[in-house]
Amino acid sequence: MPATVYIEEPPPLTNLSRAEVLDALEKSTSEWEVISSTVDFKIVDNQKNADILISWTLSYHMPAYAWGYATVWPSSVDKEIGSALIELRSDCDWKDAEAVDFQSTLTHELGHTLGFSHSDYYDDTMYFSIEPSDTSKRSLTRRERALVRYMYPRSLFSCAGFAKVALACDDLECAEIMFESEQCYDDAIFEILYAPLE
Ligand SMILES: [Zn+2]
């Protein structure tokens, strides 16, 4: 079952149109729908029954004056993620030079709704902060994609054997040549580089 996502109409001060907001949301949800993972988001046009609500909040009501903030509630039934609220600044121009990138912010906050917390790796989308206008965090790093597959595996197919070979290889370039399948390559990289996220 896909997680349904609803985003409220952007307030005028954000300088974002409905179309721009939906385009960024489409791209940011797709980024987490990693091949061979079960992550699946569906953008809906009705707030009713949305698992994830994306809302707009005044800056001074945002925790630590963040540009985006996610609150996630586990399901009472299976202890997995049940619903989430993503809050975004409602009273700032998201296209200002000092603003953080809207799509990157959405991608980061969606990561929290999947249960991921902050990464210690600066390049990761889930790093705790982002410089103004930096768009590089729109894309997950290879390490993060591997983590998504690890946390949300689609099948029992395992690349463990390949990973062992890669470890023997002990060098990423060598490993890259050995794996044509991106899935196995990412799993191998995961084995080599994975450090637990906090
Ligand atoms: Zn965060």
Image (cartoon, grey):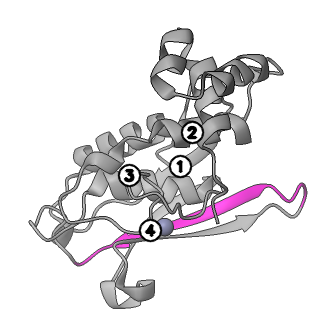
Kindly tell me whether mark 4's CB lies below 8 Å from ligand 1. Answer: yes
- 180 up-or-down from 111: above or below: above
The residue singled out by tag 4 in the image is 128
Disc number lying in front (3 or 4): 3
| Residue ID at (71%, 37%) | 150
The residue singled out by tag 2 in the image is 41
Q: Nearer the viewer, residue 90 or 166?
A: 166
Amino acid type shown at disc 1: Val
- 167 up-or-down from 107: above or below: above
Q: In this picture, which residue range is highlighted in magenta?
A: 77-91
Asked whether residue 48 is in view, the answer is no
Q: Are marks 3 and 4 in contact (CB under 8 Å)?
A: no
Horizontal side of residue 66 vs 40, given as left or right: left
The answer to which of marks 1 and 4 sits earlier in the sequence is 1
The answer to which of marks 3 and 2 sits earlier in the sequence is 2
Amino acid type shown at disc 3: Asp
The residue singled out by tag 1 in the image is 5
* Numbered tag placed on residue 123 in the rendering: 3
Whole-Å distance between the Cαs marked 3 and 4?
10 Å
By secondary structure, the bulk of the magenta-drawn segment is best described as: strand
Q: Are marks 2 and 1 in contact (CB under 8 Å)?
A: yes
Whole-Å distance between the Cαs marked 1 and 3?
26 Å
- Mark 4 secondary-structure assignment: loop
